Amino acid sequence: MTRHVLWAACAVASFAAAHASAEIAPTAVAFDETGAVATSLTGTPGNPEEGAKIASSRPLGNCVACHQVSALTADFQGDIAPALDGAADRWSEAQLRGIVIDAKHTFPDTMMPGLYKTGPFIRPGDAFTGKAAPADLAPILNAQQVEDVVAFLMTLKE
Amino acid sequence: MTTRLRATTLAAAALCAGLAAPAFADPVEAELVINDDITIKTVAPAAEHLKGHLDTVYSGWLFREDETRAMTMDDFDNPNMVFAEQALEVWATPEGTQNKSCADCHGAIEEGMKGVRAAMPKINAAGDLWSLENYVNDCRTNRMGAEAWKWNSQDMKNMTVAISVQSRGMPVAVEIDGPAQSHWEKGREMYYTRYGQLELSCANCHEDNYGNFIRADHLSQGQTAGFPVYRLKDAGIVSIHQRFVGCIRDTRAETFAAGSQEFIDLELYVASRGMGLDIEGAGVRP
């Protein structure tokens, strides 16, 4: 997804309901009271194989920094957070989408970062450069990448 | 500790469901004796001000692998010592418009610098909180008429290592009340602030998750009593502020500068979390 498309998605936010293909911008995501997000961000089904790659990659999801996932071959998986094996047995797709977008709606005060969130942040930086973030700081994952990760999580059944 | 407890509970639930539970890797049980001579306290009951946060404080030394730990135990194997030697030459070399050396005012480094590192950062005569680097540069510019060294320059790192060696085995002795108190409070606030796009505080990693792994990194309590440290990966010495820069950068945040007042305040607070530990002068990291 290009920034251009994201921008366009914001511009047409009020018509989003009428446009099946329009993306939901980070600031327009609707969480329910449990932190779940029922509506797909893109309307395009996620690709679980892409999701597996994103979950293993440091600049992207880097889920394995904190979680162990037996289904992934990534080395040095962290143990800060619960293992994700069986996640799809414990959570619905809507709940998993909400957790990936911004887990703080599901677990207040959690250490888990919001992957589809553009602020407000304290001293946001430009990725890992240590420099100040640009005004139009992009979320860590784009909308389709979130859907891909959710599709991957939905394969984690015991 | 609430996050840690919750994560552990969830992990325990996962274990009951027959899943692989994360291996909890505690600090090792080992004694740090340098040169078969100086015993360093690497475990201590936490200071009163950490009540409800930590019960016990641990040196970062206890979280490293056997080989890395061994390098701190013998000066022949400790890569810091080559640089400390270089600093000893500089200590005795006159410089600047006053043509004076450190030794001219402070005498032998073993005498003149004993215990200095253990009390840093410290309030100066003008009432400001200064780190060891500030004091070194104050002597260079105002007493020797020489150029200030940059915070993370090789000269500065060599000298802070050599000075830290003179506090070996002495307990962390920072003052946190009186004129230092407001700095200490600012540092504490920073410690619990969730910076950056990843919204992580120092406490998220070093209070709630020490002993756990974040990817390949075995998290310690982020103590500074072993600093400066020689980092094998960088083949160089890492200052306290340099480490802070790295940690804040890793939260996808805009960092503060080495030598900034913010980092001096944070340095005081982090040092105070190590009260009870001894200064190592100087540690080795992978």
Image: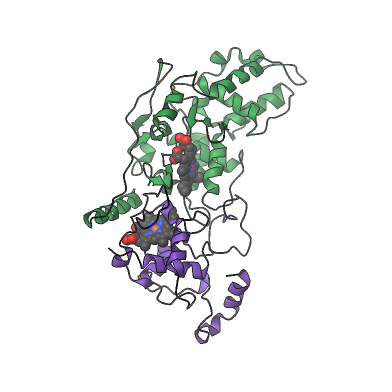
Chain colours: A purple, B green
Q: Nearer the viewer, residue B279 or B260?
A: B279
Count of marks placed on residues: 0
Q: Residue at x 49, y 34 (%)?
A: B178
Q: Residue furthest right?
A: B97
Based on the displayed image, in which of its 4 quarters is residue A82 positioned? bottom left
Q: What residue sits 67% from the left and 24% below the top?
A: B139
Q: In the image, residue A123 lies at what x, y percent?
A: 57, 54
Q: Residue furthest bottom?
A: A18
Residue in the foreground of this view, choosing between A131 and B14? B14
Viewer can see residue A54: yes
Relative to A81, B284 lies left or right: right
Location of residue B9 in the rendering, given as x and y in whole percent from the top left corner:
27, 53
- Residue B243 is situated, as x and y percent measured from the top left of the image, at 53, 39
Q: Is residue A130 above or below residue B280?
A: below
Which of B120 and A83 lies nearest the eye of the viewer?
A83
Left or right: where A87 falls relative to B145:
left
Nearer to me, A97 or B115:
A97
* B21 versus B283 height, above or below: below
Whether residue B264 is visible? no
Position of B258 relative to B99 (above/below): below
Q: Is B246 situated left or right of A81 in this image? A: right
Q: Which quadrant would residue A112 be assigned to in this image?
A: bottom left
Give residue B248's position: percent from left, percent from top.
53, 47
**Quarter holding residue B109:** top right
